[in-house]
Amino acid sequence: MPRSLWFLVIGMAINVTGASFLWPLNTIYISGELGKSLTTAGLVLMANAGASVIGNLLGGILFDKIGGYRSIMTGILITLTAVGGLMIWHEWPHYVFFMIFIGFGSGIVFPSMYAMAGSVWPEGGRKAFNAIYLATNIGVATGAALGGLVASFSFDYIFIANFGMYVVFFLIALFTYKNIELQPNIQTSVLQERGRIKNKAAFTSLLILCAAYLLCWVGYVQWQSTIADYTQKINIPLEQYSILWTVNGLLIVAGQPLIKPIVKRFEHNLKIQMAIGTVIFMISFGVTAYAGSFQGFLAAMIILTIGEMLIWPAVPTIASRLAPKGREGFYQGIVNSTATGGRMIGPLLGGVMVDLYGMTPLFFLLIGLLVVSIFITFIYDLPLKKEEVEAAV
């Protein structure tokens, strides 16, 4: 792995560690500390994610226009300013305003990080994106473990720790990212067919794929919103809830050898890999629906994590394969904004469902959405195949 990619990996790990002090606890803080309803908490997270969608799209465009270093530094400075404000003012409604700016700033950073990873090691293919994905989950494991412990003393310390980690990320980016050299994008798969595949077909396929990706995120984000609140109502301690995310991050890092045979078997057919991961998601929500203790939620989280390991790295890898030269940042921006869109829709949808009908109907709805996601995954590349057939005539 190139040295420059290591800098990106370290930076991403520190960035996500800081963010993970806060994001698993957002719903708990809004509901428990600020005294708002789950629907209100969902609206706040929706606003945060909506700003992040805009940041994702802008970050991808900025990467293509002004380069990775400048776009990443722009996002970090916006986020750092907002996190600093949140450290001082975290009551209602200040919390909402700063969360929106944090979403926007961090949204700019993520697509640029992924696009840079693909550009500094194009021959690495999925490995470059998997390295960033692993760094993200090291951050999740570390931040979530420490966050639950720190929050048990005072939520004020959470905001201070978050700010400190962003300062470290800023310094790493400032001194190491400026001199990273980007290599030309290497196209793979069906896009290698003598350049006859049009960009329109590739972009259409990306949008179809992202529809399936969105539905997966709508389900996944319930663990950070409705399920998080539900664990508190059935008297699972905050420290134990945070342990679930620590297990998630550690299992992703330690479990790579376990999923390696599946990844290798379907490395040229990533939609099968995604479909398997989605089925595993469905099993996880089935287990969660009947979980009434920490052990039940732990089992469900382990199952969810296995599915996540198959789905999350596959989508940016496909986007990198689809992206025309000079549009890598934009395509990664679409992928990241889709994930953020799921984080935007999911908490509000889940909050409304739980407030009106309870947890059990929500789980049935999520499983139904994942069935639709599998169907979409299997048809995402139809525009590419159609274009290939027409080009061969």
Image (tube, rainbow, N blue to C red):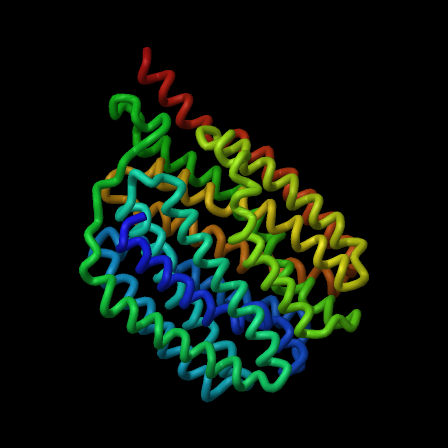
Residue 250 place in picture, x, y as percent: 56, 58
Please indicate whether residue 282 sits to the left or right of residue 76 in the image.
Answer: right
Tell me what residue is drawn at x 49 percent, y 67 percent: 48
Q: Which one is in front, 124 or 49?
A: 124
Tell me what residue is drawn at x 41 percent, y 79 percent: 164
Residue 175 place in picture, x, y as percent: 23, 69
Residue 153 place in picture, x, y as percent: 61, 86
Q: Which one is in front, 49 or 129?
A: 129
Quarter of the image for residue 80 reads bottom left
- The single residue placed furthest to the bottom in the displayed view is 88
Tell me what residue is drawn at x 48 percent, y 87 percent: 89
Quarter of the image for residue 58 reads bottom left
Q: Is residue 58 visible?
A: no
**Callout count:** 0
Q: Which one is in front, 274 or 65?
A: 274
Residue 234 place in picture, x, y as percent: 79, 69
159 w.r.t. 257: above or below: below
291 w.r.t. 385: above or below: below
Please indicate whether residue 285 sits to the left or right of residue 85 in the image.
Answer: right
Tell me what residue is drawn at x 48 percent, y 64 percent: 139
Please indicate whether residue 69 sits to the left or right of residue 48 in the image.
Answer: left
Q: Is residue 171 visible?
A: yes
- The single residue placed furthest to the top in the displayed view is 393
236 w.r.t. 301: above or below: below
Quarter of the picture containing the C terminus is top left
